[in-house]
Image: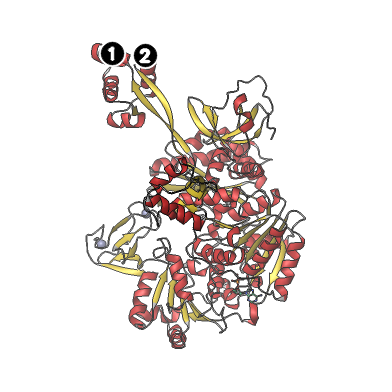
């Protein structure tokens, strides 16, 4: 950016789709830099904006000056500006809000305004009988200046903006804009050290002398640490500094998100396959953009490969971004990277406090830590000179962000790698159909790891047909005799057992035994789940809960049957069956508290857990060497979802969870229980044969023209009033049809499906409708949606009905 430029391009943090040009007062010019925030006038408000770069002098338009530059240092490097622009354009999201979403929370400042009564206003109140509402407002202000929101709250009737404006015009009140927020700041700590030419300390008090003595031994010290020796130190150092004994430094400190210390390790000797992969990738490190798919079976040592590539990239002065699907996995990956790279690693994920996240962000931005490990939002980590972007377990659906800015971090990894001219590696034992299709069309380069490290074998997988135990009761229905005996044998040998059941809670299907009515959420069309531990029925979609003692809504009967097995009930059943075993559960309920995941992982590692029960959280990438038996309680739970990816998802989950067995010296065994033993997703998972699975799945996708043979944009329409939501959806559907009919040649290949009522018709009190746009070309869909938004922009800013645009949707229900 031109440092002397008089004009800059700014993205304001408001729901608008374009950037704006502002002028920069001369005084502020040498402070302007892309990535800094500015305070700008916008209409009658002042808002935060982000500098994108300099702007050419505008033609005959009135240009307003910015009011201030907020940051001393840029929050993101200039190289990220094209990235933000791409995202705004591709996902149809306001540009300033893209940036706001990307930045760590707690940075954004908001403004509010306060009203103050003037002397004139006081006189008016006494002598002039203003209209009743005005009178109420003025009376309120007599007590002192007050925020507008507060004033309005106390007057329980609507107040028009016009009225406030009039009061201001009459000179009865003044309005002042103020800023609040920006609550997250760097933490500053004070350090003290002795001065070399300190005067003699003869006539000092004992405490003061003690401080000087300690500093003489310790050298420099944080005041906080000094207090451990001299409790009153904080109060004394100021006077010691004035008298010339010591110097106080204010220094920025970082909140460390890591608990305990980690022993350093060194690089492992790679096996042949690993060597070949590392060599092939490193050859490409300086040669620009190249996307790789690392197709490596479970336990083939992908993480070691990532680390050695990262080491090579660091040698070349480049930084590395590693995305991992979940916090649970970050813990493990972080430990391994920290053990290898120590202080070079930053971590970004939602488990950090706002302050911690801000600190990590600043360290990355300053280039202090060349490696970042994080969940999906870490794709925005402010690295300047990326050498590699690694997406581990790239098939994982949690890379897709639902709500707000609906992006897919795995796809953005490829975009960012392209813009930064660097490599990207999408790694998985079960690559997504999308990514692997890109391999077959030569857009991506495949890297293969076909063997487990140290000649370990893939576990043997046995299918158990659940149809044959349909009539069994109690535990036997879920823990079939083959599974039960395998468990007993493993436990007897002192090995660990992992049981996978992708449903948390106690019972997922409570039904009234008098009238047969299922217990449903008040706000969603979904069955509630009983949670015994917390004594409540809960909705897994909106969080609604009601007492576990509730009666049937339709007949009032207190007798509720609890069908549908959840992890909590399984745990209870096993506890009575295996009274000697130490049983633990890993699902969203048991891992909500900070540190609980680490405790569970530690328990497995230190063998204080014999049986671990878990949801899909346990399917992901973990490396537990002592697990020799994996039991899949019911493989079919996700198979029947009305979603074209249900099969893909099921195959991935099963193959991944099976891959947790036999990762140590002893061979592993998997027992897979299913109602559909012939289904190709199940048989492919049984033979752990990705290639065969892919070949079948891709035929089905092609036949129905589903992705990757087409692209989709879903319009998600929702509103609180069922009638209004439907009307609106139908209206928007008509608009789509009209648009297509108006430009038949351009949109010949755009299919409009719907509007239809969503499969989950109601969530959190909102009635949901969908329109699916499908085409072989994303560009046609983008043109279509642009034109739709321009022609009917009021539909997208409606007060009661929300229309979310979901580009490349994953959650279709
Ligand atoms: P993946 O992610 O492919 O499932 P991991 O990276 O978790 O596999 O590796 C599995 C285990 O094998 C880890 O404990 C890792 O330390 C070990 N490992 C990886 N590479 C080697 C190697 N070359 N020699 C010995 N052990 C290795
Ligand atoms: Zn009933
Ligand atoms: Zn609900």
The residue lying toward the viewer, choosing from 761 and 48, is 48
Residue lying at 75% horizontally and 67% vertically, measured from the top left: 279
One can see residue 754 in this view: no
Where residue 54 sits in the image (x, y, percent)?
A: 67, 32
Q: Which residue is mark 1?
A: 124
Question: Does the residue tagged 2 have its C-beta within 8 Å of any atom of ligand 3?
Answer: no
The local secondary structure at tag 1 comes to helix
| Whether the residue under disc 1 has CB within 8 Å of ligand 3 | no
Q: Quadrant of residue 556?
A: bottom left
Nearer the observer, 388 or 536: 388
Decide: is 484 above or below 286: below
Task: Say left or right for 416 vs 760.
Answer: right
User: Is disc 2 in contact with disc 1, using a CB cutoff of under 8 Å?
Assistant: yes
Say above or below: 740 vs 288: above
Instruction: Name the residue carrying label 2.
Output: 170
Tell me if I can see residue 541 in this picture.
yes
Distance in Å between CA atoms under marks 2 and 1: 10 Å
User: Is disc 2 surrounded by few (<14), some (14 to 19) or many (20+) residues within 10 Å?
Assistant: few
């Amino acid at each position: 950016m031109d440092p002397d430029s008089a004009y800059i391009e700014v993205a304001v943090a408001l729901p608008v789709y374009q950037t704006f040009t502002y002028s920069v007062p001369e005084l502020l010019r040498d402070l302007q830099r892309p990535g800094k925030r500015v305070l700008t006038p916008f209409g009658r408000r002042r808002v935060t904006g982000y500098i994108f770069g300099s702007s050419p002098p505008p033609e005959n338009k009135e240009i307003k000056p910015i009011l201030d530059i907020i940051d001393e240092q840029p929050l993101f490097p200039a190289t990220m500006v094209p990235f933000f622009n791409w995202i705004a354009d591709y996902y149809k999201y306001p540009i300033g809000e893209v940036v706001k979403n990307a930045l760590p929370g707690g940075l954004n400042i908001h403004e509010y305004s306060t009203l103050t009564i003037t002397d004139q206003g006081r006189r008016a109140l006494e002598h002039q009988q203003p209209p009743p509402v005005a009178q109420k407002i003025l009376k309120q202000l007599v007590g002192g200046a007050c925020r507008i929101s507060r004033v309005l709250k106390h007057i329980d009737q609507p107040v028009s903006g016009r009225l406030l404006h009039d009061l201001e015009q009459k000179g009865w009140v003044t309005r002042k804009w103020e800023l609040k927020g920006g609550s997250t700041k760097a933490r500053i700590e004070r350090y003290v050290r002795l001065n070399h030419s300190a005067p003699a300390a003869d006539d000092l008090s004992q405490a003061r002398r003690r401080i000087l003595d300690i500093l003489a031994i310790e050298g420099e010290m944080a005041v906080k640490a000094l207090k451990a020796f001299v409790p009153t130190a904080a109060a004394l150092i100021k006077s010691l500094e004035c008298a010339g004994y010591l110097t106080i430094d204010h220094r920025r400190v970082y909140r460390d998100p890591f608990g305990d210390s980690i022993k350093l390790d060194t690089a492992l000797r790679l096996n042949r396959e690993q060597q070949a992969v590392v060599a092939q990738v490193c050859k490409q490190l300086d040669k620009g953009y190249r996307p790789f798919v690392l197709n490596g079976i479970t336990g083939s040592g992908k993480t070691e490969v990532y680390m050695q590539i990262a080491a090579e990239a660091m040698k070349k002065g480049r930084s590395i971004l590693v995305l991992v699907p979940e916090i649970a996995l970050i813990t493990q990956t972080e430990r391994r990277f920290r053990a290898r790279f120590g202080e070079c690693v930053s971590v970004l994920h939602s488990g950090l406090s706002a302050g911690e996240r801000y600190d990590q962000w600043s360290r990355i931005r300053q280039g202090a830590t060349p490696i970042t490990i994080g969940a999906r939002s870490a794709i925005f980590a402010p690295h300047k000179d990326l050498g590699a972007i690694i997406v581990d377990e790239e098939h994982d659906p949690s890379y897709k962000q639902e709500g707000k800015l609906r992006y897919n971090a795995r796809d953005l990894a490829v975009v960012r790698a392209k813009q930064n001219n660097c490599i990207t590696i999408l790694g998985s034992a079960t690559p997504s159909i999308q990514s692997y299709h890109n391999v077959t069309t030569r857009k991506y380069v495949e890297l293969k790891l076909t063997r487990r490290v140290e000649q370990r074998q893939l576990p043997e997988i046995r299918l158990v047909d659940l149809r044959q135990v349909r009539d069994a009761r109690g535990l036997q229905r879920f823990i079939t005799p083959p599974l039960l005996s395998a468990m007993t044998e493993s436990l007897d040998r002192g090995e660990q057992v992992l049981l996978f059941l992708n449903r948390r809670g106690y019972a997922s299907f409570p039904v009234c035994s008098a009238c047969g009515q299922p217990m449903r959420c008040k706000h969603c069309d979904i069955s509630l789940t009983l949670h015994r531990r917390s004594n409540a029925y809960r909705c897994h979609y909106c969080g609604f809960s009601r007492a576990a003692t509730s009666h049937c809504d339709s007949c009032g009967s207190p007798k509720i049957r609890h069908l549908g097995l959840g992890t909590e009930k399984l745990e209870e059943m096993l506890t009575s069956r295996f009274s000697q075993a130490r049983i633990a559960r890993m699902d969203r309920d048991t891992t909500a508290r900070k540190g609980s995941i680490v405790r569970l992982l530690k328990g497995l590692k230190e063998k204080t857990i014999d049986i671990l029960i878990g949801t899909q959280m346990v399917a992901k990438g973990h490396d537990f060497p002592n697990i020799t038996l994996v039991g899949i309680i019911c493989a079919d739970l996700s198979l029947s979802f009305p979603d074209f990816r249900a099969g893909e998802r099921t195959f991935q989950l099963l193959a991944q969870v099976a891959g947790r067995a036999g990762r140590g010296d002893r061979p592993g065994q998997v027992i897979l229980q299913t109602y559909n033993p012939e289904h190709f997703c199940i048989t492919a998972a049984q033979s752990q044969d990705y290639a065969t699975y892919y070949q079948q799945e891709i035929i089905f996708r092609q036949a129905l023209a589903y992705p990757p043979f087409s692209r989709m944009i879903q319009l998600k329409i929702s509103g609180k009033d069922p009638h209004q939501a439907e009307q609106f959806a139908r209206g928007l559907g008509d608009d789509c049809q009209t648009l297509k009919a108006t430009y038949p040649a351009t949109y010949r290949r755009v299919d409009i499906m719907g509007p239809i009522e969503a499969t989950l018709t109601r969530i959190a009190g909102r009635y949901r409708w969908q329109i699916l746009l499908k085409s072989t070309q994303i560009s046609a869909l983008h043109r279509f949606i642009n034109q739709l938004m321009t022609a009917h922009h009021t539909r997208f800013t409606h007060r009661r009905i929300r229309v979310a645009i979901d580009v490349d949707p994953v959650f279709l229900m």
